[in-house]
Structures are given as structure tokens and as C-alpha cells.
Image (tube, helix red, strand yellow):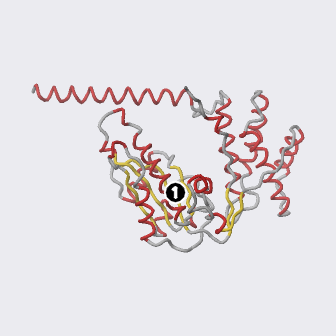
Amino acid sequence: MNRIKAILGKNALVYMRVFRIYYYDLVRFYKYSNVKQLFSNEDAYKGRLTILYHVIEKGLTMPETRLGFGLPVIKDLIDLLQKFKKEGYDIRCLEYQHSKKVLGEYFYFHQEQAFTLPEEITQQYQEFSNSIVQSPQVHQLRFTREEYFKYKDHPFDLFSSSRYSCRNYSSRPIPAEILKKCIGLAMKSPTSCNRQLNRIYVITSPEVKEEVLKLQYGNRGFGHLASTLFILTANISYFQGPNDRNESYINTGMFAMSLLNALHHHEIGACPLNWSVDHKRDARLRKLLHIPDNERIGLVISAGYLPDTLEIASSPRLEVDQITKFFA
């Protein structure tokens, strides 16, 4: 009986430690993220602006851009830009300026296609345009396959700068031996205390790919073209204490970047797809692929050989000085 009490007491102690540390995370996320959609600070606006303009960027670079796509997003983006300016935030920032440019490209694209957008949206954009200083129009990136892989064997600075997320794929399948070579290279990514907890599911079956893509948000218009999907997971049984709670995501992230670089080296285009889903979708993917309960799903990657020409979202980055602090 005393042994049972001791075990129960130990389990309760561990439970409380885990609860406290997850509660610490929960409070911070609830308080400082924009999960409540209150837009209480400038960064919350910037995050939402980026999500909205990137939806339009992606739509403009689809293999077959659907005319008139994204009208609700266009409306929300214009509304948010107006609110951002009204709040007195810095309209010189990348997020505001690039949003303006993407809007301009969207309307120019439809004008070039002689496609008439709804009057309400056109008028909303015209009123917005009249209230701002116009900036040079942005254009999404266009490559031939040879141009895109030009630096695949060059020094790391050129190699790294040349890789983008690709959403245009050809129908050519990737040989299994090439996929294994890419995974082998990715296995050189760092792991927590060399615990090698990364696991990967490679999907090439058209039927299974279709079911996986139904569960993931963000692959509309291109996901079905990928010849291969990778599902990246981490085995949480390797972790020993509450402080390890986020290590699976860190290890999966490093493995994913190494895999993306390996694919680029082997002239394969790829696009990481988030696994920001609810518990029901997570459970359905587990059931579909027979993923054990002790593995945490991190993300999905679509991949495939590229067509002769492709378009890629411009997705500009902040300057180094904008994200860096030195303590000397």
C-alpha cells in the first residue's frame, strides 16, 4: 500500500510539473498572440497583413491562376491596411508596403486578362489607392527550371539564397533512391542529445496523397500536382522531462530545413505545408497513415520535379538589422 501511495504521489508531482510549465506557455500565447483577433498592437496587424498578402501572392503564382480568386481576402486586406494607417503605425514597414504592391499586381493582372472584377471591390480599391502614395508595382518571381537550380552546387551563400518554396510541379515521379538520398542528407541535421527522434512518412500513392491534402490547410490549387508528400513527425518517447516539451518541434524544424536543402540539391522543388490543424484532423491523419500515438506530427512537405517554367511568390524578407540584437 505504501508503494502504491508513493507511485501515485510521484505521478501527481510529475503531472503538476508538466501542467505548470504548459500553463506558463498557454498564458503567454493567449495574452500576446492575436488568437483573440483584437489587433492590440502593431505586430498583430503585421502578422495578419502578411497572411493576407501571401494568399494573394500564392494565387498569382498558381500553375493555373483562377480569375477573380480571393475576393474576400482582397476586401479584408484593404480594410486592414486602412485600419493600420488609422492607428498611426509605421506605413513604411515592409508588411504595409508589400501589401500595397501585391494589391496593385492583383488588379493589374485582372486588367491584363480583361476580367471584370465586382464593382464593389474595384471601388474599394480605387478609394484606397486615392488615399495613399503609390509605390512601384511588385511582380512575382519567374524562372526557367535551369535558372532556378543554377546555384544548386555553388557555395552555401548562393545555394541558400536560391531556394524558394515551389508550388509548380511536373508529373514526373521522383525515384525512390533519390528520395532516400535526400532523407539521408537530412539525417545530418542536429538532434537533441543525438536522440534521433525524427520520423518521416513518404507518400507517393495518388489516393493517399489526396486524403492527406484534404486534411491540410493551404495546398489548394497546387498540392495535387506534387508527386510526393513527406509527413514529418518526432517520437516524444525520447524525452525525459517537462522542459523537453518543445524539443520535438525544434528537431522537426531543423530536419525539415535540411530535407528542403537536400531536395534543392537534387533539383527537386518543394514547399513546406503547416500542420496547424485541430485535434480531429490530427487524429484522422494518424489513423490514415497508422502513425503511433507517441509521435507528434510536425509538418507536411510537398515535392516534385519542376516544369520548364514556374512562378514563385516574391515573399520579401526583413533586413538583418530589423531582427537582430547584439549583446557585446
Q: Is residue 102 above or below residue 290?
A: above
Quarter placement of the N terminus = top left
- Residue 120: x and y in percent read 83, 47
Q: Is residue 137 above or below residue 150?
A: above
Residue at numbered disc 1: 260
The type of residue carrying mark 1 is Leu
- Residue 39: x and y in percent read 66, 31
Q: Is residue 126 above or below residue 4?
A: below
Q: Name the residue nearer the viewer: 250 or 184.
A: 184
Mark 1 Cα shell of 10 Å, populated few (<14), some (14-19), many (≥20): many
34 left or right of 249 in image: right
Residue drawn at (30%, 44%) of the image? 238
- Residue 194: x and y in percent read 33, 46
Quarter assignment of residue 69: bottom right
Q: List the single residue furthest toward the left.
A: 1
**SS at mark 1?**
helix
